[in-house]
Amino acid sequence: MGDITTIGLDLAKNVFQVHAVDVAGSVVLRKRLRRGQVLAFFAGLPPCLIGLEACATAHHWARELIALGHETRLMPPSYVKAYVKRNKHDVADAEAICEAVRRPSMRFVPLKTAEQQSALMMHRARDLLIRQRTMLVNALRGHLAEFGLVEAQGLHKVARLIAIVMDEMDGRVPHIARQVLKVIVSQIEDIQTRIAGLETQVLAWHKSNPVSQRLATIPGIGPIIATAIAATVADPSTFRSGREFAAWLGLVPRQNSTGGKARLGGISKRGDSYLRRLLVNSAHTVLLCSKAAKTDPWLTSLLSRKPRVASENSIHLTRSHRRIRTRSSDDCNRPLVRPYAVRLLQAATAAGSRNPDTATSAQRPAAVHAAPSAAFALGRPRPVHLALSSQERTAVRMSLCASHRLPTVVRHLLDAAR
């Protein structure tokens, strides 16, 4: 065994697992470390490559190990999982990290500085306070609605409800309820003050960061989004184009392609959900409020396709409403059954007897086997009505539902035809 060249370090809160190999890939060391032993252990090793999963505290430990002279690389945990053998435990995780960090095709996470993480903490704390404010506002609205006090949507409309709660002369709110609601109001006002303080800090960091100031020149992007992007994207040179950045944010379609056939679904929603939400909201703001955006050729072509989709949906709904409105009162009393269920019944009644008491044992299996073949040979035309007498429905249900080969959905359709 040679000297240690690569180490996989599995991070935790108190217990860390080390897996070290030499230049040939042979295992040199497996060791468990307590939190206080980590820096002393790596300080006694020659400079080597250390792989870490990009999880909680990973950026802190990466900065500490770099200060000791080691080369540190962070990897997404989802990419490391493919190298875990059989069961998952700390030793297997450390081995998988050590194996993954040596792959030439592995994608690594850029290391964030302490300043960037501090800026992200401002955003995370502000987002947390906004969620708490929303919870308190919803609670205030719900409680006052019990006394018939309802206001329109929007945070600026809550001021009227707060005024009602704080007005001692307003008899619409009982005394006991008013004392309870004052606690909620004080919490809303306190959180609002703290949110304003965090936004002041974000604006100050924005003015001191040149990258954030350049991002703010883009239409629809202000200090909040600019600072979030500048703090989240540690190394912009990682992306070769804007499309790669969009894919990293999860704004591109999810693919399930095979055999040379492209199958695209909705957006993948991978990446930072907070940053993606901010960018989507800013795009909507640009489309609604920016006059320059409405004359942009690309946006104009994009918006010109949306009314066509809306008109197609409206035409479909109009036709559906017309079919419902033109049904007679007798038709409304009859169940609506899909054509394949109708032909299932027709095939079964044609092959067997309509009366289950007189049907022979040879006729009933024929009805059961003929029904699926008739269903698979059908397309999906418009729904039609099935009108059978009560005796016919009972006969078909008893002859078909007795077989466990029919799908459960067919049995539900038959029960619905009663």
Image (cartoon, rainbow, N blue to C red):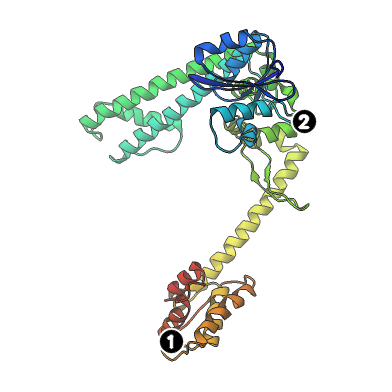
Q: Which residue matches tag 2? A: 241
Q: Which badge, 1 or 2, is on the more N-terminal residue?
A: 2
Task: Count the labels in the image.
Answer: 2
Quadrant where the image shows the C terminus: bottom left
Could you tell me the amino acid type at mark 1?
Pro
- Horizontally, residue 362 falls left or right of residue 276, namely left
Identity of the residue drawn at 35% across and 28% down: 162
Q: Residues within 10 Å of mark 1 (few under 14, many from 20)?
A: some
Considering depth in this image, is 346 or 287 the residue closer to the camera?
A: 346
Quadrant where the image shows the N terminus: top right
Considering depth in this image, is 28 or 241 the residue closer to the camera?
A: 28
Could you tell me the amino acid type at mark 2?
Ser
Residue 404's place in the image compared with 304, above or below, is: below
- Which residue occupies the extreme left position in the image? 175
Identity of the residue drawn at 60% across and 18% down: 59
Considering depth in this image, is 404 or 268 the residue closer to the camera?
A: 404
- Which residue occupies the extreme front position in the image? 1
